[in-house]
Image (cartoon, rainbow, N blue to C red):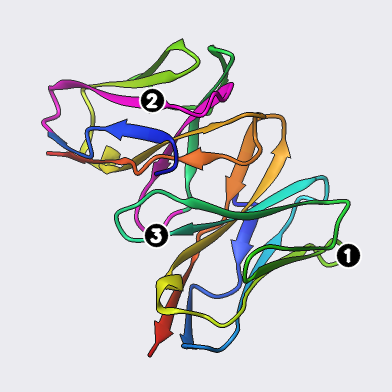
Amino acid sequence: GESVGLHLPTLSVQEGDNSIINCAYSNSASDYFIWYKQESGKGPQFIIDIRSNMDKRQGQRVTVLLNKTVKHLSLQIAATQPGDSAVYFCAENLGDYKLSFGAGTTVTVRA
Amino acid sequence: ETGVTQTPRHLVMGMTNKKSLKCEQHLGHNAMYWYKQSAKKPLELMFVYSLEERVENNSVPSRFSPECPNSSHLFLHLHTLQPEDSALYLCASSQTPGRSLFFGSGTQLSVL
């Protein structure tokens, strides 16, 4: 079965607010995690990644948090903009060549 | 542009046709992948090539046949497909297998 999942399939956010997208994973041996953004008609776009020896990593307007105790991953987007509307996927590396994806959360930004 | 180019962007084929999907990466990566994306389902890994050698064949039906002639090019040959094979087929590449994959825009395939 699927080893990576997202808590909510959809998220509606007011423009300017912060967004938090959650993901739960089941494989405690996973040592690498990635967040992707997919806009309509495009392939998944790399946002940010994190290794299991870290619990937080920051990028431009995005922060990824990793809680290995409860096997939880989250993506925080600061000051959400209309261009942030997309489907967001988390993925985990199960070892070697395999990257396993969750089903995705659709984020809609309200003006 | 992600540096990974897929052609064609759209493809409609009958169940008796033979077609090929093409992927080219301009990133100097060593690993290339085929993923299938169906509506309401997570991305499914199909094939992985590392340094032009197939290292993963994720129980994919034989009607899908990959080819990796060099580290920059990847093909997916299709024959006698079924309607349930209709999906978005995504190519990706990475420097390190299983890490930081960069995806193309995909080929939207419809099998009639």
Q: Quadrant of residue B53?
A: top right
For label 3, the SS is loop
- Report in which chain the residue with disc 2 lies: B
Residue B62 x %, y % = 37, 19
The region drawn magenta spans: B13-41
Query: Does the magenta-highlighted stretch encompass residue A60?
Result: no
| 3 and 2 marks on the same chain | yes
| Along the viewing direction, whichever of B111 and A101 lies nearer the viewer | A101
For label 1, the SS is loop
**Contact between labelled residues 2 and 3, with CB atoms less than 8 Å apart:** no
Q: Can residue B64 be seen by looking at this rendering? A: no
| 2 and 1 marks on the same chain | no
Q: Which mark is residue A44?
A: none
**Residue at the spot of label 3:** B40
**Residue at the spot of label 1:** A69
Q: Left or right? Give the position of B104 relative to A68.
A: left
Q: Residue at x 53, y 28 (%)?
A: B58
**Residue at the spot of label 2:** B24
Q: Residue at x 23, y 39 (%)?
A: B9
- Report in which chain the residue with disc 3 lies: B
Q: Amino acid at mark 1?
A: Thr
**Quadrant of the image containing the N terminus of chain B:** top left
Q: Residue at x 31, y 24 (%)?
A: B22
